[in-house]
Image (cartoon, helix red, strand yellow):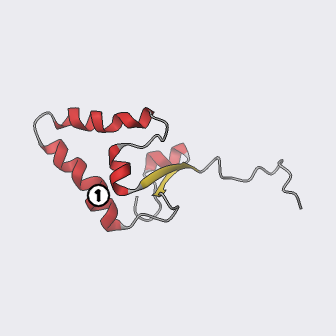
Amino acid sequence: MHTRGQSAGKALAGIRMVRSDGNRASLPRLLFRRELPLALVSAVPFGWVLIGLESLPIFGKERRCAHDRVADTIVIDLRASRVDPEEPTGF
């Protein structure tokens, strides 16, 4: 996730995680703002319920979970940013 912004599943889906400004997320940001809170919550009894609730905003307008907001990350669709060879470029 740190070097490419992708897990194997994200790579197969053609998506990538980046900071909201488009830059790569740093390793400390990923560890301490994204992964550690989820690990701590999952360690408490019935933490899976909280993680499920934390994930519900994915169905909202911005499609960002709470851990995305805390880490200031977004998921981008790489297929949408590719240039279509059939599309005229204006040159």
Residue 19 rendering spot, x and y as whole percentages? 45, 59
Seen from this angle, which residue lies furthest front? 61
Q: Which residue is mark 1?
A: 33
Residue sitting at x 50%, y 53%? 16
Left or right of residue 85: residue 33? left
Q: Choose between 8 and 72: the one closer to the eye.
A: 72
Mark 1, other Cα within 10 Å: few <14 / some 14–19 / many ≥20: some
Element type at mark 1: helix
Residue 42 quadrant: top left
Residue 75 rendering spot, x and y as whole percentages? 48, 49
Residue 31 quadrant: bottom left
Tell me how many marks there are: 1
**Position of the N terminus by quadrant:** bottom left
Residue sitting at x 38%, y 36%? 57
Residue sitting at x 44%, y 65%? 3
Residue 49 rendering spot, x and y as whole percentages? 21, 32
Q: Choose between 66 and 15: the one closer to the eye.
A: 66
Q: Choose between 13 and 81: the one closer to the eye.
A: 81
The amino acid type, in three-letter code, at marker 1 is Arg
Residue 70 rendering spot, x and y as whole percentages? 33, 53
Q: Choose between 64 and 38: the one closer to the eye.
A: 64
**Position of the C terminus by quadrant:** bottom right
Seen from this angle, which residue lies furthest right? 91
Residue sitting at x 76%, y 49%? 84
